[in-house]
Image (cartoon, rainbow, N blue to C red):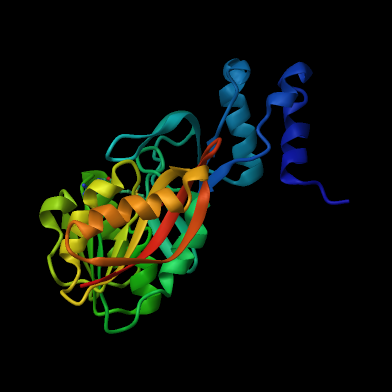
Amino acid sequence: MRTTPFQCIQQRCDPLIPSSLHKYLPRKWEKIGDILILKLSEKLKPYESTIGGIYASVLTCKSVLKETGGINGVFRVPKIKHIWGSNDTETIHYELGIRFRLDPAKIMFSSGNMDERKRMATIAAPEETIVDLFAGIGYFSIPLAYYSRPQKVFACEINPIAYGFLTQNIVLNDVTEIIEPLFGDSAHIAPRKVADRVIMGYFGQTSSYLPIALGCLKRKGGTIHYHDIFPEKTIPSDVIRDVTRIIDAFGKKVTVQSYKKIKSFAPGIGHYVFDLKIEP
Ligand SMILES: C[S@@+](CC[C@H](N)C(=O)[O-])C[C@H]1O[C@@H](n2cnc3c(N)ncnc32)[C@H](O)[C@@H]1O
């Protein structure tokens, strides 16, 4: 029978890590390009560099980072500690035929959002203009521009490091004709009355940006992809009630075309996306 990567890791750890600690070795990991991110129990702290080296050699990675907290603040910065290998943690992550350049020590990349990146890739028609209010390194904007070939994507990003990678990724994926990157708070920089579609790929205070998203849409309306984290038991009725209340106040009509859970966020709490059709 074939040895799995985890069995291989266990075998290599055997002579170096006390056997009583083997049960804490992580069976799952996040590999972004050639950078590995591990969640490690505090019990493994004295051995983290050794463990990092073993995982890196089995999984062919140049650096290993330990996740020390969640993803924080408006800039969505991951809490990370470097535990093994090169200090140059910049990498290129390949997904869906797209090249994402990023530094996972400074910028988040959620593999759990891949299905949504895939869905966004082919969502737009060629005549559309799209505004991405929270573009990051181009998670949605780049696959969308690359596969849907719309007229224009305006990609807004407030974090200077993410914005730097966004501009590089536009060039790397040859979509300079389609994507216009805009640096700053989307509340101030997003173009108004131009969009057929607005992407709101952020959570925390997404609803406070709904008026901005409405302002980006053409007079005839369009679609808003509205992300946030919600208690599962409030789905969909409370969300529909809340967005309808906000959108009603702007004299627009909203219909929820569909909604989907993207991933679990915490027990009983999920990251969801609602597709909202807005009409005058
Ligand atoms: C990390 S992405 C999330 C992308 C995608 N939903 C995912 O999880 O893969 C959200 C981005 O929005 C940016 N951001 C937050 N507030 C913003 C604002 N007011 N204007 C523009 N960008 C903003 C953050 O810096 C971050 O890069």
Q: Residue at x 46, y 48 (%)?
A: 271
Seen in the image, is 94 located left or right of residue 54? Answer: left
Seen in the image, is 207 located left or right of residue 81? Answer: left
Above or below, 232 against 96 in this view is: above
Q: Residue at x 24, y 58 (%)?
A: 247
Above or below, 56 against 185 in this view is: above
Where residue 117 sits in the image (x, y, percent)? 44, 62
Q: Residue at x 23, y 76 (%)?
A: 177
Q: Residue at x 36, y 76 (%)?
A: 124
Quarter of the image that includes the C terminus: bottom left
Q: Nearer the viewer, residue 113 or 30?
A: 113
Where residue 58 sits in the image (x, y, percent)? 66, 42
Q: Nearer the viewer, residue 231 or 192?
A: 231
Q: Nearer the viewer, residue 74 or 224?
A: 224
Above or below, 252 against 110 in this view is: below
Question: Which residue of the protein is positioned furthest toward the right in this rendering?
Answer: 1
Seen in the image, is 136 located left or right of residue 256? Answer: left
Q: Nearer the viewer, residue 56 or 98?
A: 98
